[in-house]
């Protein structure tokens, strides 16, 4: 004998954003209804922009966020302990391009791999420029 379910399973409301993982309609708090992507995390050392020292090791998470009253989606960078920043999509696109193409960033990445100052030639072994 075939079993027929008496009630259909509760399904979350399908979101209009393909990247959204929020189970709309199943959340408890209105803030939980924010559209959020799954996010991607990676280990990083972070510090304030004007800070010094080795920074703090943490997990950085990058994802897309859009609140119900937003007119656009944002790329959120979360640094743990409630510290985060969000940039608009155009700025995130520019940041991605700069990380791949900016000569100074490329030189810094090269330095990190052992070829100190690939672009600037007037610095000493510690990377100080004279
Ligand atoms: Zn959503």
Image (cartoon, grey):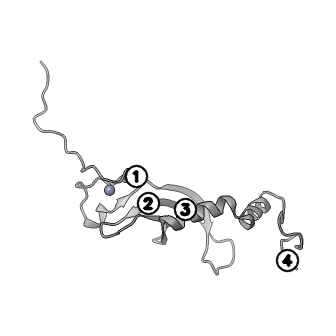
- At mark 2, the secondary structure is strand
Is the shortest distance between ligand 1 and the CB of mark 2 under 8 Å? no
Q: Identify the disc placed on residue 19.
A: 1
User: Does label 1 or label 3 sit earlier along the sequence?
Assistant: 1
Left or right: 28 as drawn, with respect to 43: left
Q: CA distance from mark 3 to mark 4?
A: 31 Å
Observer-nearest of 52 and 23 = 23
- At mark 4, the secondary structure is loop
Q: CA distance from mark 2 to mark 3?
A: 13 Å
Rendering quarter of residue 70: bottom left
Instruction: Say if mark 1 contacts mark 2, CB within 8 Å.
Output: yes
- At mark 1, the secondary structure is loop
User: Does label 3 or label 4 sit earlier along the sequence?
Assistant: 3
User: Does label 4 or label 2 sit earlier along the sequence?
Assistant: 2
Q: CA distance from mark 1 to mark 3?
A: 16 Å
Residue drawn at point x = 24 percent, y = 49 percent: 12
State the image coordinates of residue 110 (x, y, percent, origin top left): 78, 59
Rendering quarter of residue 103: bottom right
Residue drawn at point x = 12 percent, y = 28 percent: 4
Observer-nearest of 67 and 22 = 67
Left or right: 106 as drawn, with respect to 74: right
Instruction: Say if mark 3 contacts mark 4, CB within 8 Å.
Output: no
Q: Identify the disc placed on residue 64.
A: 2
State the image coordinates of residue 86 (x, y, percent, origin top left): 47, 69
Q: CA distance from mark 1 to mark 2?
A: 8 Å
Residue tagged 3 = 93
Left or right: 72 as drawn, with respect to 98: left
Residue 58 to residue 123: above or below: above
User: Does label 4 or label 1 sit earlier along the sequence?
Assistant: 1
Residue tagged 4 = 129
Crowdedness near tag 1: few (<14), some (14–19) or many (≥20) residues, C-alpha within 10 Å = some
User: Does label 1 or label 2 sit earlier along the sequence?
Assistant: 1
């Amino acid at each position: 004998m075939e079993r027929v379910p008496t009630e259909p399973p509760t399904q979350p409301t399908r979101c209009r954003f393909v990247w959204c993982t929020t189970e709309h309609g199943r959340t408890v708090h209105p803030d939980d209804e924010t559209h959020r992507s799954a996010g991607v995390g990676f280990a990083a050392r972070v510090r304030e922009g004007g800070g010094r020292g080795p920074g703090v090791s943490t997990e950085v998470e990058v994802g897309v966020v859009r609140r119900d009253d937003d007119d656009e989606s944002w790329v959120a960078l979360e640094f743990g302990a409630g510290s985060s920043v969000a940039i608009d999509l155009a700025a995130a696109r520019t940041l991605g391009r700069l990380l791949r193409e900016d000569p100074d960033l490329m030189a810094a990445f090269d330095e990190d791999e052992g070829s100190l100052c690939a672009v600037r030639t007037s610095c000493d072994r510690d990377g100080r420029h004279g």
